[in-house]
Image (cartoon, rainbow, N blue to C red):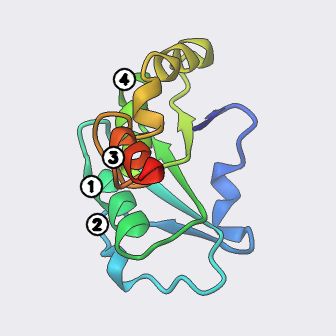
Amino acid sequence: MKLLTTHGNSEDNAAELPGTVVFANDADPMDLPLDGVKRIDLHFPKFTDGRAYSQAFLLRRRREFTGEIRATGDVLVDQLAQMERSGFNVAVLRADQPLDVAQRVLASYPGYGVGRYQGDAVQIAPHFAQTESASS
């Protein structure tokens, strides 16, 4: 997962970038037209609002969106592992969240990144199931 800080991030102008959609957290991702879309920004208005997790999961699994899904808003270090498993591949950290801590947190969960014990939005089968089918 790519991590960005709010400093130097052009999140405010995201709607003006070609191929970028800033998606409301109460909208249905099944209704979003994906033609020409390269990046979707999903917003966390507060860290306790988890609707963007569901949106990311639906975009990856059901809509098979392969572009960038970016977490914006009230993004805390504690949320990063679950964000990655839900389908986010970029997170813009809240201003008070240290980048070095965020990198350590993600490094602490290497099994999640490849779906080692459980499947996730990106790697549906767990790692052991992938290995078994590859060796058969």
Q: Nearer the viewer, residue 47 or 56?
A: 56
Q: Are marks 3 and 2 in contact (CB under 8 Å)?
A: no
Residue 120 visible here: yes
Name above or below for residue 59 compared with residue 104: below
Instruction: Return the x and y of residue 66 as percentages of the image width and height.
Output: 56, 66
Q: Dot 3 lies on which element?
A: helix
In this rendering, position of residue 87 left or right of residue 9: left
**Real-space CA distance between mark 1 and mark 3, rounded to the nearest whole angstrom:** 30 Å
Q: Residue furthest front?
A: 136
Name above or below for residue 32 compared with residue 93: below
Q: Are marks 1 and 2 in contact (CB under 8 Å)?
A: yes
Name the mark on residue 129: 3
Residue found at x 47% / y 39%: 114
Mark earlier in primary sequence (4, 2)? 2
Q: Which mark is in front, 1 or 2?
A: 1
Mark earlier in primary sequence (1, 2)? 2
Q: Report which residue position mark 2 lands on.
A: 26
Q: Dot 2 lies on which element?
A: loop
Q: Report which residue position mark 4 lands on.
A: 78
Mark earlier in primary sequence (1, 3)? 1
Q: Are marks 1 and 3 in contact (CB under 8 Å)?
A: no
Q: Residues within 10 Å of mark 3 (few under 14, many from 20)?
A: some
Disc 1 residue type (three-letter): Arg
